[in-house]
Image (cartoon, rainbow, N blue to C red):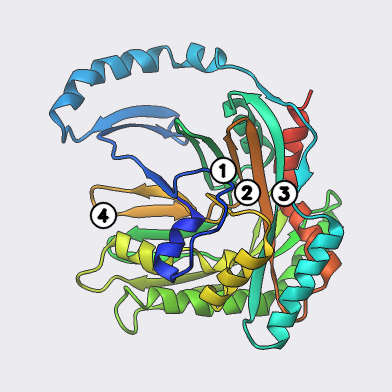
Amino acid sequence: MGYWGYDLSRRYQGLPEPAQDTEHMAQMAVGIYDWAILVDHQERAARLVSRLRYPRTEAILEQVLLRIEHAQSAVMDRTRFFVQSPVTSNFSPDEYKQAYDKVQTYLREGDCYQVNLAQRFAAEAAGDAFAAYRELRRVSPAPYSAFLDWPHAQILCASPERFLRVEEGRVETKPIKGTRARSQNREEDERLAHDLLQNPKDRAENLMIVDLLRNDLGKSCEAGSVRTPGLFELESYSNVHHLVSTVEGRLRQGCDALHALRDCFPGGSITGAPKRRAMEIIEQLEPHGRGIYCGSIGYIGFDGQMDTNIAIRTMVYSEGEIRCWAGGGIIADSRCDEEYQETFHKASAMLEVLKRFSG
């Protein structure tokens, strides 16, 4: 279990390393775990499980049980978290428009069909970010959330998007393309959802990524097994509506979950199409590297099954700074002001969390 950072893709896409590493993060951090605590929220039960693959595991299980018994007090005693400066972006409105205009030039010249352009927000911070993660999960509950507490960073993720799931040889991906901010007015909220479902631009964006992922899955799946059982479906979250499709296939003989992860990485929904050229344009236009953002967080089991997310709606706390990103896919029919505002809609929950801890 762990993360695969966006920049790890350079090894497979043939892209050069950036001249300046602004994140100072490992491109990949994955641990192999012989025991786990599994919490079943429906059954309201927790289990300590292990296959005892390593001799030392049995000796420490008693210590683990003692930690579980005192877990509540341990959570309550964690150091508080403080945001110590105003939140800044690496794009001013004018700078974003300049980057947007360059994307439009590339689109007109035929370099690409879609480019995902993101801005980064950052603030100085101190303490333990676990409290901020709990608040993020409260204000923005999402099915693919995660908190990783590494020696070099704390990662707070409230992702709504699955990247790849492998189960009994079947691969599934659920790309998100198309977003609307939600309204507290029920009728207006329903209108926004209906507009998203019927909007030709959003459907075209979504279809571009579906085609890209069909091609990516085809690298490790049986010929003829890749299909799209769900297209342009609505998923609604606390702050936004999303347009989601489902693409699936069956792994061919000799391929496993890691082959699928390598062949599809990074997810096309956060690059654009075609993938390699879109990534080159992102490298040129975004002021900072993405690091973990738009990579993937997840697990691969000893049984060969896998579940991973797209690391969006993700905050990274390291070296006294907390950072988060938000982006959107730009196509020829896009409008600059709408795309710029969409990044704030997507970042709204994370920015709200930073505001609540700013004191």
Quadrant of the image for the N terminus?
top left
Name the residue carrying label 4: 304
Question: Which element is circle 3 on?
Answer: helix
Identify the mark at residue 157; answer none if there is no mark. 1
* Mark 4, other Cα within 10 Å: few <14 / some 14–19 / many ≥20: some
Find the distance from the CA under tag 2 to the CA under tag 4.
Answer: 27 Å
Does residue 152 appear in this view? Answer: yes
Q: Earlier in the sequence, mark 3 or mark 1?
A: 1
Labels 3 and 1 touching (C-beta < 8 A): no
What's the residue type where badge 3 is placed? Ala
Labels 2 and 1 touching (C-beta < 8 A): yes
What's the residue type where badge 1 is placed? Cys
What's the residue type where badge 4 is placed? Gly
Q: Position of residue 108 (x, y in %)?
A: 72, 87
Q: Nearer the viewer, mark 4 or mark 1?
A: 1
Q: Earlier in the sequence, mark 4 or mark 3?
A: 4
Residue 9 or residue 328, whichever sits in front: 9
Q: Nearer the viewer, mark 4 or mark 3?
A: 3
Q: Earlier in the sequence, mark 2 or mark 3?
A: 2
Q: Position of residue 102 (x, y in %)?
A: 75, 74
Name the residue carrying label 3: 347
* Mark 1, other Cα within 10 Å: few <14 / some 14–19 / many ≥20: many
Question: Which element is circle 2 on?
Answer: loop
Residue 209 or residue 198, whichever sits in front: 209
- Residue at the location (58% across, 32% down)? 319
Find the distance from the CA under tag 3 to the CA under tag 1.
Answer: 12 Å
Question: Which element is circle 4 on?
Answer: loop
Name the residue carrying label 2: 313
